[in-house]
Image (cartoon, rainbow, N blue to C red):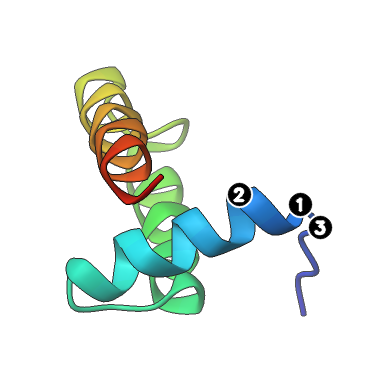
Amino acid sequence: MLYVEQGRVITNAIQILFKDLGTDTTTAIRMFLTQAVATNGFPSVNLLLSFFHEAIFRFQIVH
């Protein structure tokens, strides 16, 4: 079991983002961890940058 704590604003932004992407936070974390194991490290920097850019963009639209 993995427990991740973050602020309410981040939680809401993450939930909106993953819902728009057709998934949920648990599945997204599982995907990230699976990629970390597959690459024996952090997933592609480009993938992470793309993810964070999308999250920030969507958060700005919502608020």
**x and y percent of residue 16 in the render?**
37, 66
Mark 3 crowdedness (10 Å alpha carbons): few <14, some 14-19, many ≥20 = few
- Quick one: SS at disc 2? helix
Q: Is residue 1 above or below residue 58?
A: below
What residue appears at the point 61 percent right and 60 percent down from the top-left corner?
11
Tell me the kind of residue under disc 2: Ile
The kind of secondary structure element at disc 1 is loop
Estimate the spatial distance between the alpha carbons at disc 2 and disc 3, rounded to whole Å.
Answer: 10 Å
Q: For the residue marked with disc 1, what is the amino acid?
A: Gln
| Mark 3–mark 1 CB contact (< 8 Å) | yes
- Left or right side of 1 for 42: left
Mark 1 is surrounded, within 10 Å at the Cα level, by few (under 14), some (14 to 19) or many (20 or more) other residues, namely few
Q: Contact (CB < 8 A) between labels 2 and 3?
A: no
Residue 44: % across, % down: 27, 27
Q: Which mark is residue 6?
A: 1
Q: Counting other residues with Cα less than 10 Å from the Cα at mark 2, is it few (<14), some (14-19), or many (20 or more)?
A: few
Give the residue at x 64% y 51%.
9
- The answer to whether the residues at label 2 and label 1 have Cβ atoms under 8 Å apart is yes
Q: Tell me which amino acid carries mark 3.
A: Glu
Q: What is the C-alpha distance between the residues marked 3 and 1?
A: 4 Å
- The residue that mark 3 highlights is 5
Instruction: Identify whether 34 is placed above or below 53.
Output: below
Mark 2 lies on residue: 10
Which is more toward the observer, 49 or 32?
Answer: 49
- Camera-near label (2 vs 3) is 2
The residue furthest front is: 63
